[in-house]
Image (spheres, rainbow, N blue to C red):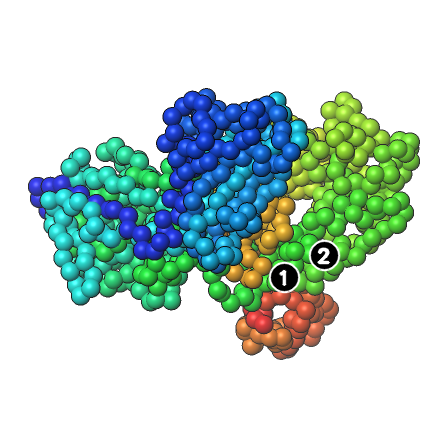
Amino acid sequence: MKQKKRCISFRALIWAFVLVFFTMSLNAQLLVKNGGFENSPVGQASGSIEGWLLLTNPGLARFEIVSDTVFKGERALKIEIDSLGSNAWDIQVVADSIPVVYNETYRYSIWARSRTAGAKVSFTVGRYNYSEYGRIHETSLTTTWQKYTFEFTVTANEPYARGPIHFSISGNAGNAVFIDNLRIVSINATKRPVIVEAESGALGSSLSTAGEGEITYITPIVSQGGDYPSDTPTVATYQVTFPDSGSYNLYVRLKVGSNPWNDDSFFYGNGFGLKQLNADDWIRVNGLASAGYTDSNEIVSEIGYAGDQVWKWVKLSGIENSGAGWELGPVFVVPEDSLTQTIQLGSREDGLYIDKIAFGRADLFYRVMDLDNNGEGFIEIPSPPWPGPPLAWKQPKFVGNIYSAPQLKRLENYWNQITPENAGKWGSVEGTRDVMNWTELDSAYALAKRNGFPFVFHVLVWGPQQPSWISDLPDSEKVQEIREWFEAVRDRYQDIDYLQVVNEALSNPPDGKNGRANYMNALGGTGVTGYDWVINAFRMAREVFGEDTKLMLNDYSVINDGGRNATYMRIIRYLQAENLIDAVGEQGHYFTTNSTGNATLKRYLDSLASTGVPVQITELDIRAANGDTTAQLNEYKRVFRLFFEHPGVEGITLWGWRPGMWVEDAYLITSGDVERPALRWLRNYLDTLVLPQVSVNMPEVNIAGEYELYNSYPNPFNPTTRIMYKLPVKSYVTLKVYNVLGQEIATLVDGVNDAGNYEATFDGRGLASGMYVYRMQARPVNGTKESFVASKKFVLLK
């Protein structure tokens, strides 16, 4: 773990790795020969080329290998269609002699485009008797390259299949179609890790090969320090061939020797490819003496906890341990056209024994037994349902989520603020004039209030999802209907914590354009400020809802775009001038954050906070694009942490957490209640983060006479607990219970008590598990101005 404190003349260490596949199906990338036409010369073609049959009736079509219109690589096949035959297969190209296995499932993928729009093609796979295993029938092509894919299962016990592509389809005459990069891949093969035996390569002179039982391993003879390999001889370059394109995590099976903190580090390349001798091109892994997994059923994720002198698997991609000098490891990306990739490694400390490395799909999880035995990875990690309390229950800020049917399961176990996703939009409630549908909105409001969670109403005024009938009314009637809408919400929900008055004023106003409702002018249009309609909507909301309801403005991409931020700030200042705004929302969607650096996000977040108005992140979603849950985890570590720890942010609302979100690949837990790594990290982060707790804005003063507020008993409790206090003199007493956001939950005492000892009982039935605060204030009735104020915490644990 340390930098070596000894002077040794370091010599080169080459670690060679050659891919070894353990089953026939791992050769899946070879199923289609010449799938990208790279083995065929440019020019006219007919009859057959490597891996393909080119078939057409005379005068119908011409075939050509081209280099000027390709998807990947340097070649593609062009089919120039002059006229049509009587059948779709009168013009076809056939991927021939594709080796397949009975009952195996495969994924077919191909890239195609046409010279002009409107061409249609059928992609098929089947038997030599012309029956099909699967197909995409007469799909339309565009003038840009598109990927077409489907899965099929081999249902006949025959060793080979064929893949015809049909072009003689109405509308294709006079057009040209281009195809490239046909791939047929075994689904099971892609799930298995790519295993590389450490001793299988050409080993450098500083590398020793040894054995331990059935294990053959390599180990360095000498050590070096630093942040990257010292010189070129310490670096080796090797080729690894993958069964499919996509994102892969890197794992290593190793053992740390008897001098653990001096035997536990090495380097590997920061991604595929040839690396330079500098720190940016290399990842240093240090602190391996206390990392990894040994039990066959353990899932190899996170850092792990195994010790030294045992064989163990360690995950490198997406893992860091900054205290040990373990740098964040990359996910390795294999592109469509380059299944063979270069990887480089280098030594750092002796006493480290390497048995093998493995690459596993980034969207799958692997147990120790899967990496040991080349077993299939799996999508879901079995885990018990989280019983609560909500993840942010210890924090002075909320972390909430949306209320919608796909998101409801165990919602209150994880999150402690509620926003209706669609139920509060005017078009959802009053799609038919004067006919109100409150059902889902009632349920969302009830869930929040039953659990003591803040309720954010989304949304009064917006362009999309508004009543279609309002656009054709005269302006005077529009204003009347808008006020009736506001008043209906107020009358039904009298304890709204935050009211989003206007949503997306910058991009989606109710201006009648692009399918949006048309009532912006009825609210004052752009006017003098450019946003008079927004100001008038807030004026109406303040008048209808009163001073006690917190009014909120919400929009997106105002923390990554300077122009939008400036406009948003101008609107906020107009509203502040009339005391019309109490909270500001930045939606925080992935398209705002995923390509924006922390410095930019913080700068514009600071700008919003400078108004003095509390900021909320209102619609956070962070993607696991292409199933890359490691990338999602790393973005949560970066973005969520930046937002939540910002002093101007009072809470974060995720815009969904289960499948069924508007950004489908941003979910945090599967339909089977299996948590993704980002959710597991988020729970630990919120459990251990220390931020200032909400305090009651009253001085806590102990006056003479020995007032006492005692610890409740029992604590934790379920469902009731007793709270005792002592009064030295006759006093006016209030004893109240609050949640961790400072919101009042219950009043237990409110009146005059004589001197003496007292007891009150708090019943937590109907509340969520979590920490609460009970607070007593007592003032002598003899006229003394000083008050006794004390607060204590207790935990409801169901």
Residue 483 seen anywhere in this rendered image of the structure = yes
604 or 430, which lies in front? Answer: 430
Q: Is residue 378 above or below residue 347?
A: below
Identified by mark 1, the residue type is: Lys
465 or 92, which lies in front? Answer: 92
Q: Secondary structure at mark 1?
A: loop
| Horizontal and vertical percent position of residue 579 | 72, 37
Q: Is residue 726 above or below residue 471?
A: below
The quadrant in which the C terminus is found is bottom right
Q: Which residue is mark 1?
A: 409
Q: Is residue 318 shown left or right of residue 625?
A: left
Q: Is residue 794 shown left or right of residue 311?
A: right
Q: Residue at x 70, y 38 (%)?
A: 503
Q: Is residue 749 above or below residue 324?
A: below
| Outermost residue toward the front in this view | 58
Q: Quadrant of residue 33?
A: top left
Q: Which mark is residue 444?
A: 2
